[in-house]
Amino acid sequence: MEITLHSPLDMHLHLRDGDMMNLVAPLSSDFAGAVIMPNLVPPVTAPGAMVAYGERIDAAMGHADFTRYMTLFFTKQTEQQLLIAKDTPGFFGFKLYPAGITTNSEGGVSNLADAESTLKMMEEMDIPLLVHGESHGFVMDREAEFLSVYRTLAQKYPKLRLCMEHITTAAALELLDEYENLCATVTLQHLIITLDDVAGGALKPHLFCKPIAKRPNDRDALLQAALNGHPRLMFGSDSAPHPRCNKESCGCAAGVFTAPLALPKLAEIFTRNNAIDKLQGFISGNACRIHKLTPTAKTVTLHDTPMAVPTAYRSNGQEVVPMYAGEEISWSVKH
Ligand code: DOR
Ligand code: ZN
């Protein structure tokens, strides 16, 4: 059995920089494009730094036909700064992190009231806002506690394109259904695992990410929404590589590295659930419609020939462990 996807997009991807980027970027090259996260050290806050980062990504991708949709790390902006950002080639939107909530987010927003004028202007200029929606509360409740913030933003800025990034709860889906101006991304791992897979037995550092995987009913609701073709739910892998030594450590870094197997695993999930007709919308169509994207035409064919997932990817002293390391998944990309 074979399926062909048209211009698949990863709406949330961490490519890092330097040797790590050179290792992981080509592993996303079956996608037609991706929204690139700005949480480098230091974060990408200025259009000039964004352009330079984009050029390094192009070099790391080699000759792959790959459209990068660049984001800037959200900070308070003047109208002039927003106009410059909007006019910078490759710019897609701003990524808002609550200060200190996840990897390299120390410079994020500590008081949303300070951001109001910027958000108002972004709404007028039709610039998307992508949000890491977690509070600083108890780890299992962080997303649920943040939903009131999404609600306030959705009500206050009805024309703002507001994306709830990497949603992990059934409650987030309910909110998505309440407001037409909300959209959301969901990762591969949150369609598959629960907290039990991370910490229910021997601790699995390579499945630890933020937001942490939640309860079975949350995972099931996310999967059903994807399989049912929810029109405002998009695939965003949040593939977040960290060096193996930082994952297998007493202070495990948050992030699951899924880029090399995301498309085969999605094909497996959607075929197994008789929902293959919904995969194209999830992987590209919804994003193109919501964000008016026109990625270069590119097809990728997947077939039900097993893929042996490597135990690790290595190059130039970098080593990163993917989800399903050393296991076989039943679909693969047909090259
Ligand atoms: O698990 C995560 N890893 N969540 C994030 O929000 C950031 C990401 C990273 O950059 O490693
Ligand atoms: Zn992320």
Image (tube, rainbow, N blue to C red):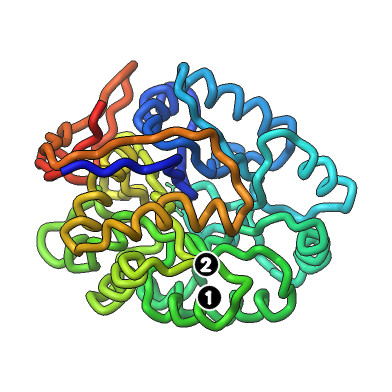
Identify the residue at horizontal 20%, vertical 63% (top origin). Answer: 274
Above/below status of 260 relative to 233: above
Residue neighbourhood size for the residue with mark 1, other residues' Cα within 10 Å, grouped as few (<14), some (14–19), many (≥20): some
Residue situated in front as seen by the camera: 208 or 283: 283
Query: Is label 1 in a helix, a strand or a loop?
Result: helix
**Residue name at image x 53 percent, y 75 percent:** 146
Say which quadrant the C terminus sits in: top left
> Is there CB contact under 8 Å for labels 1 and 2?
yes
Residue type, numbered disc 2:
Gly
Q: Quadrant of residue 333?
A: top left
Residue at mark 1: 146
Residue 199 x %, y %: 19, 63
Residue occupying image coordinates x 38% and y 45%:
239
Amino acid carrying label 1: it is Phe
Instruction: Determine whether, in the image, residue 269 is placed left or right of residue 214.
Output: left
> Which residue shows up at 37% across the image and 78% down it?
170
Percent x, y of residue 133 = 52, 67
Residue 28 image-quadrant placement: top left
Q: Which residue is mark 2?
A: 133
Q: Where residue 90 sits: x, y (%)? A: 66, 35
Which of the pair 286/90 is nearer the observer? 286
